[in-house]
Image: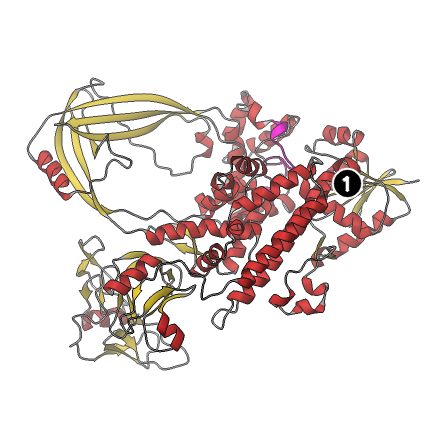
Amino acid sequence: MSKTLIIAEKPSVAADIAKVVGAEKSGSHSYVGDNHVVSWAVGHLLEFCPPEDYDDRYKRWRLADLPILPDSFQLSPVRRTTKQLNAVKKLIKSGDVSRVVNACDAGREGELIFREIYRYSGTDKPVDRLWLQSMTGKAIRDSLDKTRDSGEVQGLADAADCRAESDWLIGMNATRALTVRLRNSRDREVWSAGRVQTATLAMLVKREREILAHEPRPYWVIQATFTVTGEDDHSYQGTWFDPKADAPRDRIFDAARRDQLIKLLESGASSAKASETRKDRSETAPPLLDLTTLQREANRRFGFSARRTLSAAQKLYEQYKLITYPRTDSRALPEDYRSHVESALQFLSAKEGFGPHARNLLDSSLSNEKRNFNDSAVSDHFAIIPTGEGDPSQLSSDEGRIFDLICRRFLAAFHPPAISTEIERTTVLDGENFRTRRKVLKVPGWRGVWSREGEAAADKLPPLPQPSDCPVGVSGHECEEKETRPPQRLTEATLLGLMETAGRQVDDDHLAQVLKETGGLGTPATRAEMIETLLKRQYASRCVSIDGRKALRATARGIRLIDALERINLPRLTSAELTADLEDSLRAMERGERERDHYMDEIRSWTEVIVDRIRGFSFDTLYEGTDDLGSCPISGQAVRETLRSYCCEKGAREDVESFLLWKEIRGRYIDRASALQILKKGETPVKAGFFTPDNREYEASMHRTEEGRIEVRPRGQSGETEGLEDLEPVDVGPCPFHPENTVKRGPRGYRCDFEGDEKCKLNIPLRVCQRTFQVEEVQALTGEERKTALLEGFISKRNRPFSATL
């Protein structure tokens, strides 16, 4: 008796389908019933062959062999899933199977996974398409009764093939061409590029350039303390602001204006007038989680990388069966999933931490049902929710935190709105305005489930005796000096958000809408790996910013790549516009409005343009049209910018001593403005963007010595030996790391005299924060107790004295 073979994209879906069709006999690679065999893929079971499999000459990376444009693309089995591929191939070719049903995910990627397997099998058996967007038994039965002929989704299959092939052509050729041109004796790593990778890097580079270009500007913020008398007597603080200024309105840049305000507050004026408004604001619960939102929330709350979150979620899905499929871009559920939600609520009602919230929803009606149950908002997969089964007691720390996050968001999404009272109080003193703002939670609603533990509640502000022109007294004030800060670096959470909303960066309205509808750069399943690729290629690194935030930064290598691509006129490769343009064509192909061959001809032509421009540029003319920085202080010749440095044209041409400034110093990319300051003034003001070897940011100034060396001085420090030239060398005592050796005071600090293969890590400067260390203090620090007494006389970066124990 002939059977129908159903191929799903993953084992869990195959198990659900097998239950419906009565394929109860379970094997290592399939479920078998009287009329059906159900098997599965594990994502992609095949991958593109590397160029050397087409021709041995591609083993060497040479410009002469580019572009590589195969007439047809070859696939090879993914090594780790070869057994499953062979099993599925054997089932397709089996004499018992007369019909094949493609039950892979209902979308472009699912279509590609099945078509690759089917072509690899070499069969021509008829194929039907099962289009599933819900995994309930009824939905599976209904879809099996309404399978489509494979010809109806041929446009989708063509688009899937073209997307994969175009990414291979652009990425492979651009990477090989750039690596050949940019690699040198100092940098032998691969210079990879690609449609999503390079556009994502460009976002990090844009932010890093903004940070490097920032010049700190001092300003002051003034806060006054006011007192209210009467039944609800209280004190409160108000911040001065200028209602006519552009935001931010509370900054005072003029010292004379600052002094004028302080004089007013110190004049003894005892009466001011305060007015306030109090408004209740309703805040709807956030939607259910897709993968990108889960990764962003885990990064915000726990500092998890996108990959770490995905790894934990994948285990919760595959190993523990506690959550639904995590690699989704949907934040809604199918409309027939209400019974599943109720089962999940029953499951959570018995779990510690979730019980009261789940029981509250079971006892009352669910909120936001129209948004949460919406077939039109479900793509290949639906939102991530608890399955309502499994045992969470054995989870690791990471898995437990991600499961808790998913459960809380699931519960919160069905809760009613949170209601907060927003208070804005303006106090006027002799025509000057001081503002006080509060937001007080009145009805917790969904925030009672979702808000973080320990999240500080706003101080309550008692109402004024009268809402307008209420007399208040002035009881004190303080003036704080600050500096403008550069924009904050992107975290993984904000970068994932920018990738998802990349359409906002595209000027063309139509292409911007395409990106909005297709989910931006990459997919939820690939974005985490894309960030890891940028880190692996040393285009970006994880760092700790000056304010202590964990963030991502573009490295000098990453900035150099984007700079080169922009200058050789390949801006589309660094922009989301390329993805938008390709997606627009692929969607037309899905609708049958675009020919596959015509699309691939355009991709091949664009690939040739990429290779030709990378092959054809000259390092000598890369910065042609850019003004010289000035004259070399040694030769008098012009100083020009190159890809890796700012250098004198004579020195570069004749290899003689001249001005040379590398574009990377202490982890900082040296921007053009900084180079100009060093050339013309011999130094820069204090700037951000320097990094320690463990990627912690610090601020420093740069100084060019008489010998032409660049000296980096962290904020608060003078030159390493300035004012200390006459200090005599002194033996301090035994080294704590090499007791047989001695710590000595020299012109550059206190160091161990150990001379082995690796230098001793003991390195204490002569001066820190404008305070010089005494020998006795260093002896205490390196002695048995390893600490000093309380030391006074340090000066902070804001020029304030402080004391410290080291």
Q: Is residue 806 above or below residue 105?
A: below
**Residue located farthest toward the right when viewing the structure as drawn:** 1
In the image, 140 versus 345, the foreground residue is 140
In the image, 795 versus 105, the foreground residue is 105
For mark 1, give the secondary structure: strand
For the question of whether residue 720 can be seen, the reply is yes
> Going by the image, does 263 lie left or right of 238?
left
> Going by the image, does 21 lie left or right of 233?
right
**Residue located farthest toward the left when viewing the structure as drawn:** 267
Q: Is residue 333 above or below residue 653?
A: above
Residue pictured at 20% horizontal, 80% vertical: 729
Q: Amino acid at mark 1?
A: Asn
Residue pictured at 39% horizontal, 81% vertical: 756
Q: Which residues are magenta?
A: 374-393
Which picture quadrant has residue 453? Answer: top left
Quadrant of the rendering where the N terminus is positioned: top right
Q: Is 382 part of what is drawn in magenta?
A: yes
For the question of whether residue 384 can be seen, the reply is no
Q: Is 11 part of what is drawn in magenta?
A: no
What x and y, as percent, mark residue 745?
A: 23, 76
Main SS of the magenta segment? loop
On the image, numbered disc 1 is attached to which residue?
Answer: 102
Graded by Cα atoms within 10 Å as few (under 14), some (14 to 19) or many (20 or more), the crowding at tag 1 reads: many
What x and y, as percent, mark residue 551?
A: 42, 51
What x and y, as percent, mark residue 335?
A: 64, 26
